[in-house]
Image (spheres, rainbow, N blue to C red):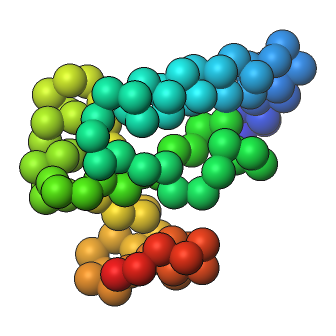
Amino acid sequence: MGVAAQLSNENVLRGVDVQTASVRDYFINKVLEDISGASLNGTLLNRLPNNISFSFKGINASTAVGLLSEMGVFCSAGSACNNGDPKPSHVLTAIGKTE
C-alpha cells in the first residue's frame, strides 16, 4: 500500500490528472459529435478526471455496452454503486435525469 500511495502521489505531481482529463474531454467530445442521441450526464466543469457518464436515446443499454466493448471501450450500463439494483441512480436523479 505504501508503494501504491507513493506512486499515486508522484503521478499527481507529474500532472497525470491533467493528462487524464485531457483524454476524458477528447473522448466526451468525440462521443457527442459522432453518436446521435448521446448526451453527457452532468457538465464538463468540476468533473473527476477519470469519470464520464453518458445517456443514449434510442439504444438498449446492454447493446450499447456490447458494441462499445467490441471497440475497446469498457463501460457499464449503470453506476458501480447501484450494480444489480433496478432503481435509477440517486446521483442521476439528483442532477435532474428522469427514469
Q: Residue furthest bottom?
A: 87
* Front one among 10 and 15: 15
Residue 53 lies, with reference to residue 6, above or below; the image says below
3 left or right of 59 in image? right
Query: Residue 22 falls in which quadrant of the image?
Result: top right
Residue 98 lies, with reference to residue 34, above or below; the image says below
Placement of the N terminus among the 4 image quadrants: top right
* Front one among 23 and 81: 23
Measured as percent of width and height from the top left, residue 80 is found at 42, 63
Measured as percent of width and height from the top left, residue 72 is found at 26, 24
* Front one among 8 and 81: 81
Residue 51 lies, with reference to residue 97, above or below; the image says above
50 left or right of 87 in image? right
Which residue is depicted at the point 27% across and 75% down?
84
70 left or right of 85 in image? left
Kindly tell me whether residue 81 is visible in this rendering.
Answer: yes
32 left or right of 50 in image? left
